Amino acid sequence: MRYYFYWISLLVLALDFITKLIVKTKMNIDDEISIIGNFFLITSHRNRGAAFGILQEQRTFFIIVTVIIVIGLIWYIQMMRKSAKPVLMIGLGLVLGGAVGNFIDRVRFGEVVDFFKFNFGSYTFPIFNIADSAIVIGVGLIMLDTLLGMKEEKARMRRDDGKEQEDHEQQTV
């Protein structure tokens, strides 16, 4: 399918928008709905910072950085779309959709709606949303593509070295 990575971005964006809208309209801030006991809850939370709540109240900074990142992602996707492997392109599509999803919240409301809450005993993992999940999964796929590419490059270098050795041995005979 042509330009599937942009369709992935749009799917992430749509899911992120719809889930945030449901949480904003159906839940009050700090309301919780238990999904799996106290381990997994849907909650209504607002984040004016970055991941894990860092850099609170830095809206202008996040908007500028996100615009730069989105432009860079689109440029890179366009450069790589004909030669890159699907794992990389899917990862880039996920990151793009997630970045735009959170960007829209920051521009419109000055904050991001988060709602997935996980508790591990007394530790509560920072609350997150679909866009955050897409970014993390996308970065994981980009890293996987990099590692697989390094492995393939090493194998190619070994084959090339073996061929050079064989050519050298044939020349000396």
Image: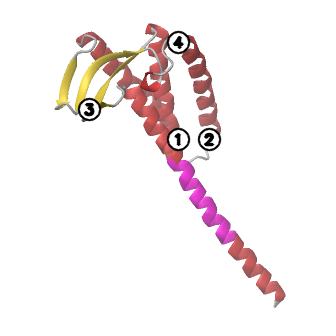
The answer to whether the residues at label 1 and label 3 have Cβ atoms under 8 Å apart is no
Residue 130, located in which quarter of the rendered image? top left
Viewer-side label of 4, 1: 4
Amino acid type, residue under disc 2 in the picture: Met
> Which residue is label 2 attached to?
80
Residue at 48% of width from left, 44% of height from top? Answer: 141
Q: CA distance from mark 3 to mark 2?
A: 44 Å
Amino acid type, residue under disc 3 in the picture: Ser
Give the crowd class for mark 2: few <14, some 14-19, many >=20 residues within 10 Å. few
| Element carrying mark 2 | helix
Residue 112 lies, in percent from the top left, at 41, 16
> Which residue is label 3 attached to?
122
Amino acid type, residue under disc 4 in the picture: Arg
> Which residue is label 1 attached to?
89
| Element carrying mark 3 | loop
Left or right of residue 168, residue 1 in this image: left
The answer to whether the residues at label 1 and label 2 have Cβ atoms under 8 Å apart is yes
> Which residue is label 4 attached to?
59
| Element carrying mark 4 | helix
Residue 76, located in which quarter of the rendered image? top right
Q: Which residues are magenta?
A: 144-160
The answer to whether the residues at label 4 and label 2 have Cβ atoms under 8 Å apart is no
Q: Residue furthest left?
A: 37
Viewer-side label of 4, 3: 3
